[in-house]
Image: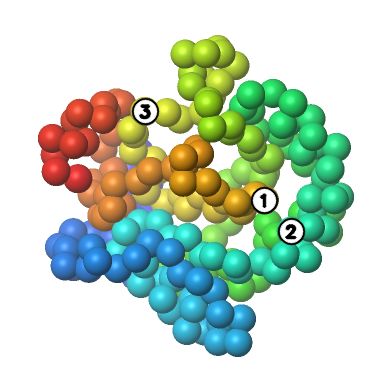
Amino acid sequence: KPNRTLRRLKNNKSKRFDIFANRNNSKIDTNVKFDHTNPDESFRKADLVLRTHGAVVIESYFKKSTIDIFSKFYENEILEIKSKDSSFGKDLSLSQELLDVWLDPHIYKFISNYYGTIPYCRSYPLLQYVDKNSSKKFDVTKQGIAYEWHIDHCAILAQMIYLSNIEANGTHMEIVSGSHNYPNVCLGLYSDEYIENCGL
């Protein structure tokens, strides 16, 4: 799709084509503990991590009270989605509680600065649940969840807000650090062995 390539060239303020720029920055941690007393510095660190790895985890950005209010408002939807082993997504009714986390103005500005252009929402936010025993071989309804290694659209940033703590042995998302700098050519799905043999 040539328009994606053209948009990527036009808005290359994040230096995503500079494949070797961050080669020696692999020691930079992927997580940034958000400091509410110094938000500018926290976002500066988050920007460096995002440009280096292609992903960033901003810890404790939303206050617990905000997440509690959101969870309480959508309590029925959360209970419903957790009644299944896993679910790829459920639409939520529009509310102020949703807007407060989905369209947070500071996160919006952070994403805008990264891309060097005004971002827009590709789709409506979804509530998603993946249990730690999730595997597509157990249930055909889980096949909407991306299990295999793959390449995503170069101009899309997936924003996820976790409503519960992450366990070390629980479900998790993995990315290949720096792969956001690679050409956006998807040759299909990739195996764990392929990723390991590439030294990634």
Farthest bottom residue in view: 37
| Amino acid on which disc 3 is placed | Glu
Q: Residue 53 appears at what percent x and percent y? A: 32, 59
Q: Residue at x 72, y 65 (%)?
A: 64
Q: Residue at x 61, y 81 (%)?
A: 36
| Tag 1: amino acid | Leu
Spatial CA distance of label 1 from label 3 is 24 Å
Q: Between residues 75 and 20, which one lies in front from this camera angle?
A: 75
Residue 60 appears left or right of 183: right
Please give the residue where the numbered disc 1 appears in the rendered image: 163
> Element at badge 1?
loop
In the image, 98 versus 29, the foreground residue is 29
Q: State the scheme by which the image is colored.
A: rainbow
Give the x, y percent position of residue 168: 46, 46
Counting residues from the start of the chain, the first of labels 1 and 3 encountered is 3
Q: Quadrant of residue 79?
A: top right
Q: Report if residue 18 is visible in the image.
A: no
The residue carrying mark 3 is 148
* Residue behind mark 2: 67
Is there CB contact under 8 Å for labels 1 and 2? yes
Q: Element type at marker 2?
A: helix
Calculate the distance from the C-alpha at mark 1 to the C-alpha at mark 2.
7 Å
Q: Nearer the viewer, mark 3 or mark 2?
A: 2
**At 29% from the left edge and 33% from the top edge, which residue is drawn?**
186
> Is label 1 or label 3 in front?
1
